[in-house]
Amino acid sequence: MSERATREETVDVVWSGSWVAERLGVALEGDGELQELLGLALRRNPKRAHLLVSNVLGKHVPQRPSVVHGAGFELGERVRALLGAQEARRAVVLGYAETATGLGHAVADGLRDAPYLHSTRRPVAGVEQAGGFEEAHSHATSHLLLPEDRDLLASGGTGADASVLVLVDDEFSTGNTVLNTIRALHALHPRERYVIVALVDMRSAGDRDRLAVFAAEIGARVDLVTRSTGTVALPDGVLERGQALVAAQEAEQAEQAKQAGRAEGSAGAVEDADSAPVTRVDLDWPAGVPDGGRHGFTPAHRAALEAALPAMADRIAAELGDAAGPAPRHVLVLGFEELMYAPLRLGTALEAALGADAEVRYSTTTRSPVLAVDDPGYAIRTRLVFPAHDDPADGPGDRYAYNVAGAGFDAVVAVVDSTADTPELHAPDGLLARLAEHTGHVLLVVLPSYVPATAAPTGVPGTPTPAPERQEPAVLPEPLRGPDFSSYAPEDVGWLLQDLSDTELEAPTEEREEAIQSGGAHYAESLPVEYQPSAEYQALFTAALETSAARIARAVGTVTETVLAERGPRPVLVSLARAGTPVGVLMRRWAQHRHGLDLPHYAISIVRGRGIDATALRWLAAHHDPADVVFVDGWTGKGAITRELAAAITEFEASGGPAGFDPEISVLADPGGCVRTYGTREDFLIPSACLNSTVSGLISRTVLRADLVGPDDFHGGKFYRELADSDVSGLFLDTIAARFDEVAGQVEAEAKELLAADRAPTWEGWAAVERISEEYGIHDVNLVKPGVGETTRVLLRRVPWKILAKRGAGADLEHIRLLAEQRGVPVEEVDDLPYSCVGLIHPRFTRGATGADGKAVQGA
């Protein structure tokens, strides 16, 4: 297909990026075609306010279908020429949802013999995931891979190895998303060659170098095929000024709409116009042909579709001709979010059917919110807003159609799949009603949602059938959030716990210790009485917080940067309640402050000897990809919880629970050498270890007791509202977060060094604990609690026997010495200790082992 045939029409003499460029100083620098291909718009986004708007993609800007398909087809032909015909037949094409699903399909057409798959944000009941990944700059980021043929990515469905994976996106901005995808898929199906395809390559020089380093790292060749190349020049402060400009424009438009007495979704409607009729068109879609590439699309499917397209286009043209009034000359074929390719090909066929007597354009709806400004120098002139109509996995919300209102279309052909043919589509504020305000005739085409053979309940395997009713999972409880449960802000953390605040669970420390050591009770079946610090101890906490804030901020930044680098750009933080929860909140704040990321964060219960909360894991799997979950804790001692979590995840999967959770824990401090991902391996004072609930959102430690927690319940916890006057949870977070900018340079250097280092666990702490257990005649590692944090817990919650302090340890142990003095516990200085201190629980405890005041006796 020639360049002349594929070049888009240039209608406006004004560049559709000039409005943004003039106000913010943003500039596109590159080859001569760049401004023809791209305009600029603005959006609410904490990381990147500007949006590159393609004129040939068919997403935001209506364009001739032949131009849209031709742009992708030509890229596919270039890939075929690069690979050679023989290797092209062994390639698999993967496109990105939602924007590049149609582009990727057109690239596969240009390759001729390649099967195609696109990622999706719509889970399909009964179809097992073959993978998933995150997209750094997208409005909605979670991508799923749901091929019907599990071997598609490995072999292209041929049974032989697929030698090349071709990844297609609309723009190549930083390369993060594509590199993350290749890294994940290379681990599953290593191959020698990858080809990245995009309409425009807008990477910086540093990003280009990173691609070369990455290719060498995985030992594969990575080629790049693009139509145009350039960069985006961004002046200092452009993000903040862009956000302010968006806010000002939205406020102005809201006021104008208010004065005009109309809703945003109907902005730009012709006043007093009658709604256009809606006509349903039955296309007789070819049996066995998927409606898109969500589950895979083979060359055989392509041939069947090509043969059927002319007849389907004739049916649409006949309905357009039957409309009252003059024959429509300006027609829009409007696709639906990920459903881009089928509407696009219907559009190309309709162009041929209507000939020169009509102008056909093509675009699709989208879930991405973008500011609309009615100016010829701005890429998004108008927008229609309507509710989601496909019961999306991420819940209800607004959807958008851009540059449709005011475009003068005589008719709109709306194409959806059967899953999206819902009451919301036909509602008074739904998509069809919004379209009817701006055109003379609306045609509705409903394609049968393809159901893979593995999921189809009836019918011939592989035959498209109406989408099955969504199978709702068993009702699971919802997370608890502040201020109703905890003093944390609701966005800081969702507690996967049940509220036992009205249940009496506290017991005196001595009674709990005797019951635990005698085997009569488990420590998680009751709660210790909350320690109320003296004024002296509270002052010590405040001083320690101020002294260590920068040190903790560095550790928070280092562990967060490591997680972002190794676990993708948008991990789901899951802290182990409750010691891990302040750390999870701080990691979330670092990601938001430094990168503009709004990371999900939940707190989950894990109990030594009883495992992790399986109901909470099921909840996480129902709402997120398990592979994205990163477990977070405060510190390691001897590594008991590290081992507990690994065993619990294995048991959970073996019992039929969803697979894919990574049991590795990320911690602030790893003095025991038990994990790979940490902020530091130094054993120093983390002030949140000094207190109990008053530094952890006023939440108790977690409770697991058979009479309170059923098989489908979350583990329990209490909210100590009555301790609000003593709460320092917010002070702890704010004091550390205030040091983020101060330590940013150190964090960058430390994270870079860690990522290149050997971080394999040494389990040094476990060996020390075993040695101490035997040397002191305890013979039970569970009664040896190493590290500043664990020693503090012993003094606050258990019956301590002795404290071992590393000789010469200084300020980090001031609170330990004070607590030991208050409880009558000796502090013994020792050499050759890998920790700053170790707390020893009384090894033969009965209530007779303490005096009437509950203080520990000196002898064993």
Image (cartoon, rainbow, N blue to C red):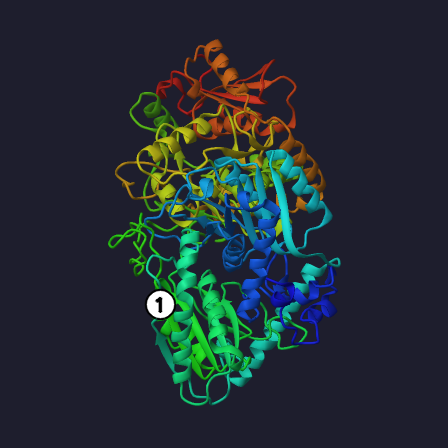
User: With respect to residue 182, does 676 lie above or below?
Assistant: above
Q: Residue at x 40, y 53 (%)?
A: 300
Image location of residue 459, percent across then percent down: 25, 55
User: With respect to residue 483, does 217 lie above or below?
Assistant: above
Q: Within the image, what quadrant is residue 717 found in? A: top left
Q: Residue furthest front?
A: 85
Q: Within the image, what quadrant is residue 468 found in? A: bottom left
Q: Residues within 10 Å of mark 1 (few under 14, many from 20)?
A: some
| Viewer-proximal residue among 631 and 821 | 631
Q: Residue at x 55, y 21 (%)?
A: 762
Q: Within the image, what quadrant is residue 229 found in? A: bottom right
**Quadrant of the drawing holding the N terminus:** bottom right
| Viewer-proximal residue among 359 and 443 | 359
Q: Residue furthest left?
A: 458
The secondary structure type at the circle numbered 1 is loop
Image location of residue 188, percent across then percent down: 48, 36
**Quadrant of the drawing holding the C terminus:** top left
Q: Residue at x 41, y 48 (%)?
A: 146
- Give the amino acid type for the residue marked by disc 1 in the picture: Asp
Check disc 1 and report the residue beneath it. Answer: 421
Is residue 342 shown to the viewer in this render?
yes
